[in-house]
Amino acid sequence: MNENNVVSSAPGRIDLSGGATDWCGMHTLSLAINLRAKAEVSLLKDTSLIQIEIGNEFVEYKKPRYGGNLDLFKSVIELSGLKGFKVKYETNIPKGSGLGGSAPLTVATLHSLNKLFRKKWSLYYIAELAQRAETLKLKTVQGLQDQYTAVFGGLVYMDFRNKECQKGKYSKPVEKEPYATIEKLDQYCPNFHIIIAVPQVERVSSNQTNQELSELYLNGNKKVVNQMKYVASLTQLAKKAVVDGKIQLLYEIINKNNNIMIEWGWLSKYNLEVMKIAKKNGALAIKTCGAGRGAMAIFAKDKNHQKQLFELIKPKVTQIYKVKKDKGVKFI
């Protein structure tokens, strides 16, 4: 890192409890994990130019045009109000996995820009602005847990009361909302032994699965509204279970969250197959990640059990990882 080049890295996450309630002003409990994304930002001589590079894709422009694969990056850069730089991205978070993979990219971008251009953005502001790139600019249905977990890392309980996190007409500019309430619970964090299993992914983005549920909630569908309230109340119990050291209760709550996702139709046949294997072989808890139909977090008893589950599940999935709790956004 020097005065012309800054690199930031931010983590993906597992949503232990709360899930979709982050886009309707309730509570979530998330764990940042050591699958990460990074954004390297370098100054350009032309102060009106922007360059974006990720994988084999590259774009250069002075005024963004939307309608392609790089729209998310264009939108967060446009919201930053800054120009005259190149951003190069790398990530080892599987696409469409439900591990919050877009948020680490946008959070890392703003974190690097904050340093490079000597801005005075708080970490809260960075989390909020990264989320608005998706809801205000791209008008997708997204909550805030991904961005806040990417920023603060660790095991984090989040309270989104008095926030409107939907899309377009439902979301508000950062300046017109309170920040979320963030509680770091790292000192109480159990010694998790986690496997992330990624079977065949049946969606392109979380917006696909969030959209239908969001409309039902906003239209006052009684069943969905009650399910949201139930999951939010489970999350409050999950926080207490963590603080009180009642780990078995925490696993039961994680499983109850996953059962609600099954009711929503958020588990594909591939998810159900992996879940069956994990259950049969003694997994303590299973949580389909994000808006479903992607990765699954499987909680083992210890390292030996983690290894056993890993080998049993590996032939049934496209990608598999052993992960652990990780820090939030940082310079590298």
Image (cartoon, rainbow, N blue to C red):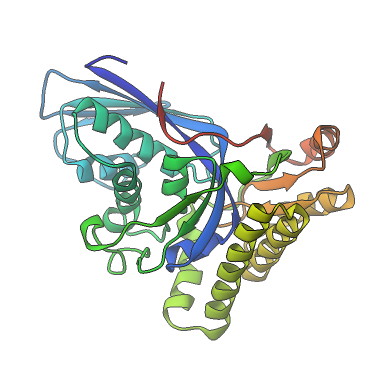
Regarding residue 57, the answer to whether it shows in the image is no
Quadrant in the picture for the C terminus: top left
Residue 271 to residue 49: above or below: below
Residue at image position (15%, 27%) is: 84
Q: Nearer the viewer, residue 315 or 81?
A: 81
As drawn, the residue found furthest toward the top would be 2
Regarding residue 330, the answer to whether it shows in the image is yes
Count of residue discs:
0
Residue 314: % across, % down: 77, 36
Residue 247: % across, % down: 74, 52
Residue at image position (23%, 59%) is: 173
Q: Nearer the viewer, residue 212 or 112?
A: 112
Q: Quadrant of residue 317?
A: top right
Residue 164 to residue 9: above or below: below
Residue at image position (44%, 41%) is: 152
From the viewer's perspective, is 133 left or right of 196? Answer: left
Q: Quadrant of residue 307?
A: top right
Residue at image position (49%, 70%) is: 212
Quadrant in the picture for the N terminus: top left
Residue 229: % across, % down: 55, 75
Residue 122: % across, % down: 28, 42
